[in-house]
Image (spheres, rainbow, N blue to C red):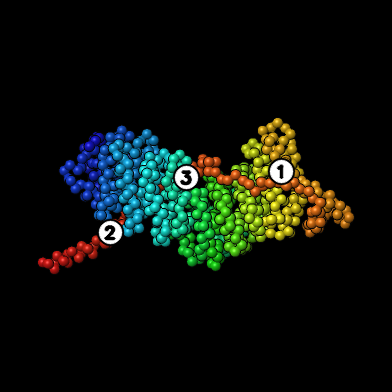
Amino acid sequence: MATRKRSGSGSKRHLKEKVVQIYESFFRGEDLTSDNPTFWDEFFLLKPKIPQLEAEIQKLTPDQLLNMKDNINLLVIQCIEMLGQEHHIRLVYALQTFSALLTTMYQRFAQDPNVNIKTVLLGIENPGCKMQKLLEHCNSVLSGDVPESLKSMVLKLLLIIATGVDNIDDNPLVEFLMLHSLFEPLIHLLCTTTERQQHGYDVVLLLMFLVNYKKHESANPYVVKLSILDDELALNGYGQVITAALNDYVMTTFGGMQTNTGGWLSSLTSMVGGIFLTNDETQPVLRGQRYSGGEEGMLLALYEAAHLNRNFMTTLAHSSATASAPPSPPATLPPHQTPPNLAQIQALIDNEQPTNLLVTFFQYCSIVMADTRTEASINKCSLCFITLTCIVEEQFANSIMHDQNLTFKVQLYRLPMRHRKIVPEEPPSQPLASTLIDLLVEFMMCHLLKKFPGELYEVCVGVLQRVLSYQKRCRVRLTRDWRPLWAALIALLKFLVTNETTLLRRHNIFLMAQQVVNIFNLFITFGDTFLPTPASYDQLYYELIRMNQVFDNLFYMALRYSTGDGEFKAEALRLANCLVNVRAITQHFAPKIDAWLASQSLSTPSEDQILEVVRKNYDSLILKLQEGLESYERYSEKSYRSLLSKLVKGATAFARQRSDAAALGHHSAALVSHYTTLAVPTLCKYYLIAIYID
């Protein structure tokens, strides 16, 4: 074995536990097996001392670490061998030792990227065979009839491997998980309630990481298998784990707003004073965000399922009664977060109301979308929007959300602002498509800031366009008040025109304005096929006429840029052309209304009077038929690779904290206690037999 000298080796030793002495001798390069053939059997019966093991490895210089590779290879081989033994104590301690070894080596790799952890851990000869044997043992444990704590330790080990490096593509050990897939045993753990409650969070998180390993560079078996998964039990289990994690975040946020004397709704009305949404510094801090991070991995897992697997859309509608379902078990929660109590659940949702993944996701989005102050919050908000984009592009998901017989009371988070007061009221029971539109309206109205999140608005308007396109194609009449949506879209156009000089430095506002105007064109041209009543169509014309100044200013801005030689000339010209029908409406009805007012000797007409004039003058209105308004470019992940990479790195760092030595030690102690309890009756039986024979 390789040797190295250590200063102070001749000094008087203090009394140390035997396993610590073995660590020290082992990492000095001493051969401990030559005089003791049963050394490894005895070694793995000793309880590991993880801090001391990690300290011994951290003491090694890079050269010493490289010289120690033969010893470390041997330790890894023995750990893997013990995983296949029937002696449970050795199996548990081997798992704990190997996990600590992996964790420390990944730490060394983070400190010095030149460290070749693949060579140090597995050696040069047949590293694939060693990892294959390890993963076969993991498969046996995950699929076998063993204590749940043992499965938890194996999952923690796999998470240590998957999250060892911030950029999973640079992780040399994850490649072996691609060659020897564990997809089937992992998915099987989601099919039963007990195992899902114990391991669901870790399983879904692990699958999310593995799906993201070089997904655009080579064939990833986890991407392929997740995309074709059609096991209803597994998909529902996958969705329930995500629902539990997102629901914990929602409960934490809303529950934190509760007071002793009233519910969370009444407390919202007291959040006044300095909370005004006029600049970036005045946005309120959501108290629930102190636990932010644990749900991001689940949000990524939801995105991957919605993006890859069309069968997953059936899970979105899988309903369960919230009141009859217990809070998420501690095993599915991030560390230091306790499950919400039932009082918080009852404060949010009526006991009689069912819920599903979409309901919880909409509530979660309403909280996340309230904060766009930092890059991290914008990234999370972007992920919510692109996940919504994937969902609304699916026909089945749209049919669920527009089903008039499938209604929910969904309480969305709303920001207190200067121009409105949050009034405590019960949310209406409505189809989820209507709730989604409410969510989009809330976002559009609350972020017209100096630091304008233009990219988020583009995706937000894109989600809205897809929902309306479905309604137009399928002639679905969604019963709701459409005026708040029209008001939000007009407010957005007014903001773009008012702040054109500032915004054009960072955003192409002409493209966004064209998106919005085309949505109005969709209402104008085809609104009679999907608006609920003729009165709704009349109200659309009323809003266009009432806010004609906004559209005129938008047209003049587009005209100004389209006649110049600037970089936005082409986009400005297209925007001006898009406004042809809106301007036709305002120019047609304005003189009709003025003539009617003159005939009635009125100066300030009421809404009903304007609507009456509109109804009488439809016949003489000439509009241009515009085709392709409902068409859109389907979502492509290519545009968001950088964003997704950042989010996966963040989730990796958070997950690495959860797979710490304390968690492994807890499972290890539980297993040792379990196996010791099983062993005592057996020993007593043999002892009694021996006495009887004597």
Rendering quarter of residue 400: bottom right
Count of numbered circles in the view: 3
Asked if the residues shown at circle 1 and circle 2 are in contact, with their CB atoms under 8 angstroms apart, the answer is no
Asked if the residues shown at circle 3 and circle 2 are in contact, with their CB atoms under 8 angstroms apart, the answer is no
Q: CA–CA distance between discs 3 and 2?
A: 38 Å
The amino acid beneath tag 3 is Val
The amino acid beneath tag 2 is Tyr
Q: Can you give x and y, in whole percent of width and height, for residue 505 in the image?
A: 64, 36
Asked if the residues shown at circle 1 and circle 3 are in contact, with their CB atoms under 8 angstroms apart, the answer is no
Residue bearing mark 2: 675
Residue at disc 1, secondary structure: helix
Residue 245 is at least partly visible in this image: no
The amino acid beneath tag 1 is Cys
The residue under the point 29% across, 57% down is 672
What residue occupies the far left of the structure in this picture? 694
Residue bearing mark 3: 648
Q: Quadrant of the C terminus?
A: bottom left
The residue under the point 71% across, 50% down is 525
Is 456 situated left or right of 155 in this image? right
Residue at disc 3, secondary structure: helix
Nearest the eye: 123 or 682: 123
25 versus 488 height, above or below: above
